[in-house]
Image (tube, rainbow, N blue to C red):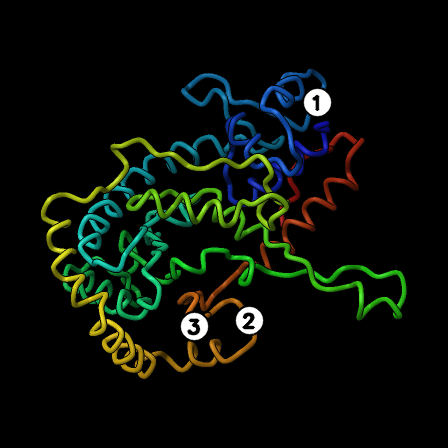
C-alpha cells in the first residue's frame, strides 16, 4: 500500500534534479510497487501541505514540494531545451547509424538541461567492437564539429559510454552500500555490499532510445529483471516507447553500406583492427583517465564489457544528498514545515 511518505520521498528525489513530475512520472519513480490509481487519492487529498500542483498558465498537472513553485518555469524551459537538444542528437544518430557495429544509440542524462549542456549518448555495439566503434564515431563527429571537446560542449555530442551487446546488465558498475551488521562476527559472512545507485537508476529510467529499438528492449530487460538492482529502486518504471518521429531508422543507403562494410568491419579484419585501434586510443588517453581506469572504481571502465569515461562521476554525492534530504524531511514531518525542501 502506498503511503504519504512514499510520495514525499519520490518528490524529494526528483526535486534534487529540479524536476516537477506529472502524476504518471511520480508513479513511475515511486520507490514501492503500486498501481497508478493508488496514488491519485494521495495527490488530491486535502490538508497535505507537502504537495502542490500548478494551476493555470499551462502548468497544470506538475507536482512539487511546498515552496518550490519556481520549478514550473524551469520545467517549461526544460521542455524547450529538450526539443532543441533532441534535434542535435537525431542529426548525429542519423550519421552514426552507418557504422555497422552500432546496435543502439540512446539519449542519456536527458532529465535536466541548461543552455550550456552537451548531449550524452549511450552506444551499444557488436561484441568485441567497442574500441573500433569509438574510433569511427569520434572521427566522424569531429569532422562534422558535433563532438564535445574541451570547453566546446554546448549542444555537442558527448561520446563517453559504450556497452557491448553481450554485457548489457549495469549492476557491475552500480554503486554499492555496506549492509549494517548486528555484530562483528557476522561481518564477513552476511554483510556483503548491496547495490544502491539511485542516480544510475534514474539515468536508465529517463533514457530515450533514438536508434536501434530492439537492442534497447534487450538492454532494458537485462536490467529490469525480477528482483534486479533497478527493480528494487523503481519497481513501477516502464520501457520507454518514443513515437516514430523521435526515432532514427535505417534506410536503403545505410542498409547497403553496412552490409558491404560489415564484411570487412565485422569479420576477421575487424578483429585485427579492433586490437590496433585499441592500442592507439589507449596511448592517447589522458593521465587522469589512465589513473582512474587503474583504480577499483566504476567511474572509468575500460574492458571487454564497456568503455565508460565518466571522470567527474557525482553519483556518490547525489546519493548522500538524497539521504540527507529524506532524513531532514522525516525529522520535520508533523510540523508546519513538513515536506518543505531543505536548501543546502
In percent of width and height, residue 135 lies at: 25, 69
Residue 48, label in figure: 1
- Residue 212 sits above or below residue 189 on the image: above
Crowd class of label 2 (few under 14; some 14 to 19; many from 20; radius 10 Å):
few
Give the Cα separation between the discs numbered 2 and 1.
42 Å
User: In screen coordinates, is 244 left or right of 15?
Assistant: left
Q: Are marks 2 and 1 in contact (CB under 8 Å)?
A: no
- Residue 53 sits above or below residue 134 on the image: above
Viewer-side label of 3, 2: 3
Q: Earlier in the sequence, mark 2 or mark 1?
A: 1
Q: Say which residue appears at 15% left-offset and 59% top-offset.
A: 144
Q: Say which residue appears at 60% left-offset and 38% top-offset.
A: 235
In the picture of the structure, the residue carrying the numbered disc 2 is: 297
In the picture of the structure, the residue carrying the numbered disc 3 is: 303
Residue 252, label in figure: none
In percent of width and height, residue 28 lies at: 54, 33
State the SS at label 2.
Answer: loop
State the SS at label 1.
Answer: loop
Q: Earlier in the sequence, mark 3 or mark 2?
A: 2
Give the Cα separation between the discs numbered 3 and 1.
50 Å
For the N terminus, the image quarter is top right
Give the Cα separation between the discs numbered 3 and 2.
13 Å
User: In screen coordinates, is 190 left or right of 84?
Assistant: right
Q: Are marks 3 and 1 in contact (CB under 8 Å)?
A: no
Viewer-side label of 3, 1: 3
Amino acid at each position: 500500500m502506498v503511503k504519504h511518505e512514499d510520495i514525499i520521498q519520490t518528490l524529494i528525489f526528483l526535486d534534487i534534479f529540479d524536476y516537477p513530475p506529472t502524476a504518471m512520472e511520480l508513479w513511475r519513480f515511486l520507490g514501492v510497487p503500486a498501481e497508478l490509481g493508488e496514488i491519485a487519492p494521495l495527490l488530491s487529498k486535502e490538508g497535505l501541505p507537502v504537495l502542490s500542483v500548478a494551476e493555470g498558465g499551462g502548468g497544470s498537472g506538475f507536482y512539487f514540494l511546498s515552496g518550490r513553485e519556481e520549478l514550473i518555469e524551469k520545467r517549461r524551459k526544460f521542455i524547450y531545451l529538450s526539443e532543441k537538444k533532441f534535434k542535435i542528437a537525431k542529426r548525429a544518430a542519423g550519421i552514426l547509424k552507418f557504422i555497422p557495429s552500432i546496435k543502439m544509440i540512446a539519449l542519456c542524462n536527458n532529465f535536466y538541461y541548461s543552455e550550456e549542456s552537451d548531449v550524452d549518448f549511450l552506444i551499444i555495439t557488436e561484441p568485441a567492437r567497442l574500441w573500433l566503434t569509438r574510433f569511427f564515431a569520434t572521427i566522424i563527429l569531429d569532422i562534422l564539429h558535433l563532438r564535445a571537446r574541451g570547453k566546446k560542449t554546448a549542444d555537442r555530442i558527448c561520446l563517453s559510454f559504450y556497452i557491448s551487446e553481450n554485457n548489457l546488465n549495469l549492476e557491475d558498475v552500480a554503486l554499492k552500500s555496506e549492509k549494517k551488521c548486528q555484530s562483528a562476527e557476522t561481518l564477513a559472512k552476511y554483510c556483503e555490499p548491496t547495490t544502491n545507485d539511485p542516480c544510475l537508476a534514474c539515468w536508465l529510467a529517463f533514457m530515450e532510445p533514438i536508434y536501434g529499438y530492439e537492442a534497447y528492449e534487450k538492454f532494458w530487460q537485462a536490467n529490469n529483471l525480477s528482483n534486479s538492482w533497478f527493480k528494487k529502486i523503481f519497481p513501477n518504471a516502464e520501457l520507454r516507447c518514443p513515437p516514430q518521429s523521435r526515432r532514427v531508422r535505417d534506410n536503403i543507403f545505410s542498409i547497403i553500406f553496412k552490409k558491404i562494410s560489415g564484411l570487412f568491419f565485422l569479420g576477421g579484419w575487424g578483429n585485427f583492427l579492433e586490437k590496433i585501434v585499441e592500442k592507439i586510443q589507449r596511448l592517447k588517453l589522458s593521465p587522469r583517465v589512465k589513473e582512474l581506469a587503474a583504480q577499483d572504481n566504476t567511474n572509468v571502465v575500460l574492458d571487454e564489457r564497456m568503455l565508460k569515461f565518466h571522470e567527474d562521476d557525482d553519483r556518490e554525492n547525489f546519493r548522500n544528498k538524497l539521504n540527507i534530504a529524506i532524513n531532514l524531511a522525516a525529522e520535520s514531518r508533523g510540523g508546519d514545515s513538513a515536506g518543505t525542501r531543505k536548501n543546502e
